[in-house]
Image (cartoon, rainbow, N blue to C red):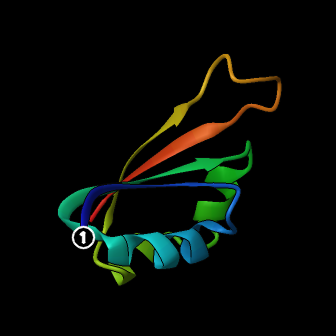
Amino acid sequence: VYDLAVSRAVSSMPIAAEYCLPFVKPHGYFVALKGPGIKEELSKDPGIFKKINAELVRIEQAAGLDDYNHNLVLVRK
C-alpha cells in the first residue's frame, strides 16, 4: 500500500480511481492527469468519490506541458 498513486491516460475518472485507489493507503492520494473535459466528466456523476470513500481535493491546470490543457486531479482516500 502506497502514499501516492498516479495515472496518465488510463480511462474515465471512475475507472481510473477504481484501478488506483486500492493501492493507496488511507489518507493517501491519487493523482490523475486528465484532459480539458474533466470538469464535465465529473459533473456527470458528482457523487463518484463519496461512493468510493474518497474526496476530490482539487483540480489544478498543468500549465506548460503542451497545448492540450491537461489537468491534475488530486483525490484523497
For the C terminus, the quadrant is bottom left
Left-right relation of 38 to 47: right
- In the image as oriented, which residue stretches furthest toward the right? 67
Q: Where residue 56 sits: x, y (%)?
A: 37, 56
Residue 47, above or below 31: below
Front-lying residue, 41 or 9: 9
- Please indicate, yes or no, whether residue 38 appears anywhere in the rendered image: yes
For the N terminus, the quadrant is bottom left
Q: Residues within 10 Å of mark 1 (few under 14, many from 20)?
A: few
- Give the tally of numbered discs: 1
Residue 59, above or below 62: below
- In the image as oriented, which residue stretches furthest toward the bottom? 51
- Please indicate, yes or no, whether residue 47 appears anywhere in the rendered image: no
Which residue shows up at 26% across the image and 62% down it? Answer: 2
Left-right relation of 77 to 32: left
Q: Where residue 3 sits: x, y (%)?
A: 24, 55
Q: Where residue 71 sits: x, y (%)?
A: 61, 39
- In the image as oriented, which residue stretches furthest toward the front? 1
Which residue shows up at 20% across the image and 68% down it? Answer: 25
Residue 64, above or below 33: above
Instruction: Give the quarter of the image for residue 62.
Output: top right
Instruction: Give the quarter of the image for residue 12.
Output: bottom right
Q: Where residue 10 sits: x, y (%)?
A: 67, 64
Left-right relation of 29 to 48: left
- In the image as oriented, which residue stretches furthest toward the left? 27
Residue highlighted by disc 1: 1
Residue type at mark 1 is Val
Which residue shows up at 74% across the image and 31% down it? Answer: 69
Circle 1: element type = loop
Instruction: Give the quarter of the image for residue 14.
Output: bottom right
